[in-house]
Image (tube, coloured by chain):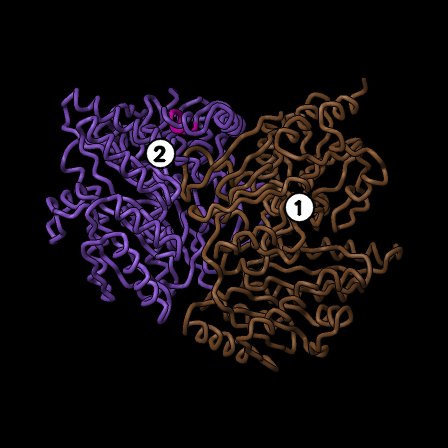
Chain colours: A purple, B brown
Amino acid sequence: MDVLTELIRSLPAGVVVTDATATEKYRYDWSRDASAGTPLAVVRAEDASQVQATVRWAAAHRVPVVPRGAGSGLSGGSSAVDGGIVLSLERMRAIEVDADCQVAVVEPGAYNAEVKAAAAEHGLWYPPDPSSFEICSIGGNVATNAGGLCCVKYGVTTDYVLGLDVVLADGTLVTLGGKRIKDVAGLSLTKLFVGSEGTLGVVTRAILRLVPAQGARSTLVAYFPTAVAAAQAVVAVRSRMRPSMMELMDRWSINCIEDYKPMGLDRDAGALLIAQSDAPGTSRGEEVALMEQACSAAGASEVFVTDDAEEGEMFVAARRAHFHATESRGALLLEDVGVPVPLLPDLLARVAEIAARHRVEIPVVAHAGDGNTHPIVVYPPGDVAAEQRARAAFDEVMAAAIALGGTITGEHGVGRAKKHALPDQLGPDVMALTRKIKDALDPDGIMNPGAVL
Amino acid sequence: MDVLTELIRSLPAGVVVTDATATEKYRYDWSRDASAGTPLAVVRAEDASQVQATVRWAAAHRVPVVPRGAGSGLSGGSSAVDGGIVLSLERMRAIEVDADCQVAVVEPGAYNAEVKAAAAEHGLWYPPDPSSFEICSIGGNVATNAGGLCCVKYGVTTDYVLGLDVVLADGTLVTLGGKRIKDVAGLSLTKLFVGSEGTLGVVTRAILRLVPAQGARSTLVAYFPTAVAAAQAVVAVRSRMRPSMMELMDRWSINCIEDYKPMGLDRDAGALLIAQSDAPGTSRGEEVALMEQACSAAGASEVFVTDDAEEGEMFVAARRAHFHATESRGALLLEDVGVPVPLLPDLLARVAEIAARHRVEIPVVAHAGDGNTHPIVVYPPGDVAAEQRARAAFDEVMAAAIALGGTITGEHGVGRAKKHALPDQLGPDVMALTRKIKDALDPDGIMNPGAVL
């Protein structure tokens, strides 16, 4: 009996998929990683015991395992590996809300939006909101420590993970944390697995903290002559308050979105800020007034405020459409660089300079209130020279972020797309420390090999 | 040259202290660990390079190193080890506030209160507030992932640590994280070191996130006929809002405090709740009204509200005095157990039952809004039989918390006092995982041996 047959026979019918047509769509995430491999098989696990059986088998035969949620990653963190297994969690989607404890107990394949919806039925809220929240999985969110738009006020995924079930590289299932809010018994293992991009184990269940439903929001929209001016407004606002959203789009991005789905944005503006306040009662108006003032002082050409939820959501939806709007313009290299908030204007200036020098388009959107930006390097597919210039620009943007005391990835993860730049940020000693932990937990290197490290 | 002389000569005069009288006070933390050892020497490091020199020397000679902040720990996490070094960080106290980035860059010996004060000069706030905040160090706060009174709304230490400098067990100094808010480049190493109680390395610098200054607070004080009724009020409040403080004291605790420092608390009440709201504008009044209503519905005998900051602080100060008030009543075994918030009434009922059965006093104070409680087992010093009953009660309280899905320690850490109970909570697989990480980072086991593991 060959090795794969052993796996197929150990799991229920239909769980292991080997047909090449069927497995093709499991090779890539949204980064369309050109070096994605061809897997031996895709395991579509139905429960934690099947995950354990798969990992035990993989450990016995030293077969690589690439865990995969919804496949909406942007760094190639779930690109298939030649001869490996793609371990898809897409069928593990149970969500159970414990309203008394204000937690959701969630399987990794459940979508972020489904958790939000389940929480909302109990008047509760799960804040982290990647732009892709409607179709990204909680497993992927945990793997990348995903952020989103509301993080400027409400924090990122790790701030909401109270507990995890994880299948380790030898197939052992461990339960970390639980429904208690504070817990310092032993090492912070739950936190270690959040953001580990499937390199240390496979998350099979997460206990997520929920909070009372978000209150009413007011939305401010401001146009600026330049992206740098908009960034200066962001710095001014952040020094005095924490808005519940603070997004920036530069001129390229505005025009991408208008081309994709016209909604009357000002194509001539240098940048657009979309900010929200959800402060309770009268303080919402005060926060909005403060933001309005900061925008005007930074040279905004137009400031518009609405308390109408639907109208506000239109602008936010435009922002969320950015990835797909840009995708239609060519091949993409997706950045996710971050800097300390006061250095946001410098970063944007450097990105513009890099784009000009390499003659590539780099539209920028940013979770500006966090200093986290998404410059997207666009180039014509198939144009080898342009691709070379794009790759050079991509690397230079990361180098610029590092030089400004920032990070090559704020929320997407390192995956395979940014692996080559990680040592530039962390340095040899932190890389060695990382390697020690990886080797201790996955001595044979079967967990998502080629990602991060 | 003997080994210790080598260390003394490698460091400036006065850094290494060997005089037994001088080193005596470095043997214990506030838990007065009876099994604390006698150190070879105390190193009072002045900077990170001296920490490195000490750890390199210790690694070369396999000498245990016990890192120590202000010595206010409550679990024996910094008890000296026979023949080891106490590595005191008390002289490393620099604090630098970067107001633009809204961070404080802090050496480990700085007191929590000093960081708060430095932040306040810039209109900023460092929220985590252990009861001992006036005399506990940031290094200790990071080591234990310390909590406090405001955590119910503002989170714990780990939520504020953006970066750490850590001297590893081989003397390497690594810099983790930085001034950026979001960063997912590589494993979550910063988070791993927070709460590691000096078992993985020595923190020599922390970058702490600051937030805008806290707004005005209103204080609610409510008396209840029983602690369980007070806990029910807590559950009701927490299901609808997040107060900025929600502390509970039972009858024993009220009387301890009145004996220690009379302030007119009702000695006959079953329990006292002290809650605060710092919501902005008119919503503060709404939150207080909601809490008032919940207390009345849960059977409060008296509810009192004040918007006067000084008057509110009087009650909070009484709560903070609890440890010292209890200390004057006998020998103590300090609990720090936590449960999911809805199970708080059950936990309190079980603690009362355990106290009665073992004929020991167990006054309870609690960061009730987080489900984190501090039952303190009091017994007459020198009474062997009473001490035995007290130790049995101490273990049963931890077992009760675990049985309720809780934790043996919410914010104090495992240290040496709770080490024997850790496997009961984590189980063999998580203990094995913990051991793998410990062995990978500290193969010779020189970092704080005997603590946690």
The quarter holding residue A293 reads bottom left
Mark 2 highlights which residue?
A401
Q: Position of residue B87 (x, y in %)?
A: 70, 35
- Residue B191 vs residue B204: left or right? left
Amino acid at the residue labelled 2? Ala
Q: Nearer the viewer, residue A290 or A390?
A: A290
Range drawn in magenta:
A447-453
Q: Nearer the viewer, residue A372 or B346?
A: A372
Q: Does residue A359 appear left or right of residue B347 in this picture?
A: left
Q: Can residue A208 be seen from the camera position used here?
A: yes
Report the front residue among B48 and B224. B48
Q: Which of the 4 quarters of the picture holds residue B323?
A: bottom right
Q: Which mark is residue A289?
A: none
Q: Is residue A54 above or below residue A271?
A: above
Q: Chain of mark 2?
A: A
Determine if the magenta segment contains residue A452: yes
Residue A121 visible in the current orientation: no
Q: Which mark is residue B414?
A: 1
**Number of residues whose C-alpha sits closer than 10 Å to that of mark 1, classed few (under 14), some (14–19) or many (20 or more):** many
Count neighbours of disc 2 (C-alpha within 10 A) and say few if under 14, some if 14 to 19, many if 20 or more.
many
